[in-house]
Image (cartoon, rainbow, N blue to C red):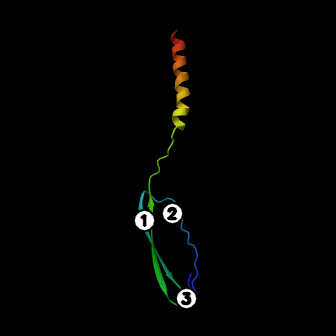
Amino acid sequence: MEHGTRQEEIFMDVDGLGIGTYNFTLYFEDASGKSNTDTVFVTVAEVIPEYGLTVPLILLPIIYLGVLIIRKRRK
């Protein structure tokens, strides 16, 4: 950090943005009139849940029981 500078965090709520890339340009100016800008790109992508083996492990016993019930009713 340079002498005479101060770093602070800036938070911005970006909930509700649709899928895409957004360009936010921040403009800073201090009391003496010195200014600076910074650009931030925010990319919103679709999240596809990864179920892994969870779904098959849950469905397999249900399907097996269904087959057993159908076979038993046919006898």
Between the C-alphas of marks 1 and 3, the distance is 29 Å
Mark found first going from the N terminus, 1 or 3:
1
| Percent position of residue 70, x then y | 51, 17
Mark found first going from the N terminus, 2 or 3:
2
Number of numbered callouts drawn: 3
* Picture residue at 54% right of the left edge, 33% below the top: 57
Report the residue marked by disc 2: 14
Q: Quadrant of residue 24?
A: bottom left
Of 27 and 52, which appears nearest the observer? Answer: 52
Report the residue marked by disc 3: 31
Give amino acid for label 2: Val
Q: Are marks 2 and 3 in contact (CB under 8 Å)?
A: no
Kind of element beneath mark 1 = strand
Between the C-alphas of marks 2 and 3, the distance is 28 Å
Give amino acid for label 1: Tyr
Q: Is residue 32 above or below residue 7?
A: below
Of 10 and 2, which appears nearest the observer? Answer: 2
* Picture residue at 44% right of the left edge, 52% below the top: 46
Give amino acid for label 3: Ala
Q: Is residue 74 above or below residue 55?
A: above
Rendered image: mark on residue 22: 1
Q: Residues within 10 Å of mark 3 (few under 14, many from 20)?
A: few
Q: Are marks 1 and 3 in contact (CB under 8 Å)?
A: no
| Percent position of residue 10, x then y | 55, 72
| Percent position of residue 33, x then y | 50, 89
